[in-house]
Each structure stands twice: as structure tokens, then as C-alpha cells.
Image: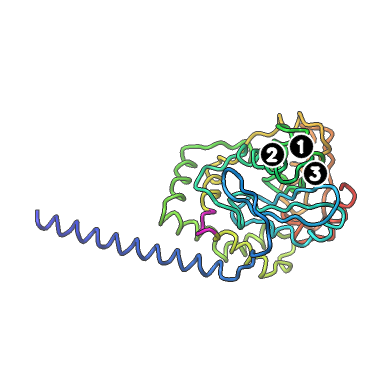
Amino acid sequence: MKKRGKRFAAFLSILAAASAAIYAVNKIIIQSATAGHLLKKDSSVFAWRFGNVKYTKTGKGSPLLLLHELSPCSSSYEWHRILSVLSTRHTVYCVDLPGCGLSDKQNITYTNFYYVQFLVDFTKSVIGSPTDILAAGLSSSFAITACSYEPKLFHKLILINPTPFSVLLQIPSRRRRIAKAMLECPLTGTLLYHLIVSRRRIQREFEERLFFHREKVKPEYVNAYYESSHTHNSSGKYLMSSIIGNYIYLDIRHALRSIDQDIVILGSSGQEYMGATLSAYQEVNPAVETVMIPEASHLPQLESPEKLLEHLKIYL
């Protein structure tokens, strides 16, 4: 019995030491990632019922709400290369979506309807009048659903590289639920998250998927995305776990079919299967207008702002 007791005590000591080491490593990674304060800027706070949301309001004219791609690495920084031009003709509201950037990152399961409710509440409480929306990637699905849910709050929708229906139709499976639970573990889950959003992996993501020309990837872009993923003690892992678990996806085809607003989709030629995605959206709603941006990939607002602005001037 004494031997078993000693072995158990030794096991607990090893476990405690390992936990302390993981905690220390996580803290060092977080402090290093956020030391540059690249996302620090003068911003306002929308005290939403589910946490504080950071946003900026610039320019003068008809309201325009910018929604960046939904990822713990993304933030309103995504729009910084086109923001000043858009602000010459519009009152531009640029938000860090809940779970992203400098906004609060709650320990919750994020869903499509969570963001729909945010869009509705933000438009009513902050903008105060019907607005146009410029949304990127997965955030396009929230804009479409919100427009179907509260059509009087929104005018024109301009979507950049929206998520294919094949992705949006995914549902949580047992394997996905397990992956979500693993990522949400306090110590090991945070360490796993840090491996997923390491600077090297973000650099590779920019070069292989986000940009068409890898030579256009600037270190400041990688650093800003790296910092965004680690703010609020890396609580962006809860958003990532919801994405990995397929909880964020929703079949939006009925919503897309039902809305009456003008919808323009700007697709990038370097975005995989974008031609098929544009056709699929038009098949659901024939009124959808589509444009292909040449030599650009997932983030033309960062890689090719001049090309993007040429089209935005037409449709806005």
C-alpha cells in the first residue's frame, strides 16, 4: 500500500510539474504574440449583452458596415487598406466581430444565429438606420441570414469570396464534437490552439491560400493576424473550436432565396472552386450579380485593394 501511495504521489508531482510547464509556455507565447500592440487603436465600444465589441466609425455619408472574415486570426485590420477610400463616401462602421480581434472572446459555442443577433442589435443600437454591408468569407452567411431575418435593416449586400454551400451544410459529428472539447481544455487545449495559430502556420496560410502572389505577403500582416489570435489570453480558441466543431455553419439557401435586396458577389480567380460557388449562389437566387477579380485570392482587400475598390465604386 505504501508503494502504491508513493507512486501515486510521484504521479501527482509529475502531473503538477507538467501542468505548470504548459501554463508557463502558454503565458510566454501569449505575451510574445501581443507585445507589438499592432491592433491597438482608438476605437469605440458597443456594450452588447454578450460582451464588449470594439468598432470604429469613420467618414461621412450613407452607412456601410464592414464584416471581416470569421477566424480568431481575423479582425477589422483586414480592411485597413481600403478603409480611408470608403470613408470618403460613406459613414463606415468597422467592427472586430465577437470572438475576434480586441472584442471580448466568450467561452461559448458560437453559431450563425449568434452573429445574426449581433448584426441586428448593432445596426439598431449603433448605426440607427438601414445600412449596406460589405462582408468577407464566412461572415457573408451571417449577413445573408440577418437580411432575411430583419430585411428592413439592410440595403445592399456585397460579399467577398463567400463560403461554398458544401461547407455551410456541414453539421457537428461525434468526431467534431470531440475535437471541439479537446481544444477547449484549459491547459492542453490552449497549447494545441497555439500550435494551430503559430506564426509559421499563419505565414503559410497567407502564402498558400489567402494571397495569390506570395511575394505580396508582408510581415506586418502575419504579425497582426498572429496578435489577433492571442488577444484576451488566447480565448479565440473558443471561436476556433466552434468552427472546427461545425457549429458555426448553417444552410443559408432558403435565406438567400427569400431576400429581396441587391446582392453582389466579388469572387477571386485564385480562390479554389470560386466559379462553382458563384454559379451555385446564382442558381439559388438568379438576381445575384457576380464579378471575378483576377490574380487575387481569399483576401483581395489586403492583397489587391486597388482592384477591389474599382468594383466597390461601381456597386456602392
**Mark 2 lies on residue:** 120
Q: Quadrant of residue 284?
A: top right
Residue at left offset 80%, top offset 44%: 132
Relative vertical location of residue 122 with respect to residue 150 in this rendering, above or below: below
Question: Which residue type carries mark 2?
Answer: Val
Label 1, secondary structure: give it. Answer: helix
- Whether residues under marks 1 and 2 lie with C-beta atoms below 8 angstroms apart, the answer is yes
Farthest-out residue, left: 1
The residue lying furthest to the right in this view is: 314
Residue picked out by circle 1 = 153
Q: Is residue 233 magenta?
A: yes
* Nearer mark to the viewer, of 3 and 1: 1
Mark 1 to mark 2 CA distance (whole Å):
8 Å
Residue in front for this viewpoint, 294 or 54: 54
**Which residue is found at the position 72% from the left and 37% from the top?**
144
Residue 307: quadrant of the picture: bottom right
Residue at x 55%, y 40% (from the top left corner)? 247
The label on residue 47 is none
Sequence order check, earlier mark of 1 and 2 = 2
Residue 11: x %, y % from top left: 23, 59
The type of residue carrying mark 1 is Leu
> In the rendering, which numbered label is found on residue 132?
3
Circle 3 SS class: strand
Tell me how far mark 3 sits from mark 1, CA to CA.
9 Å
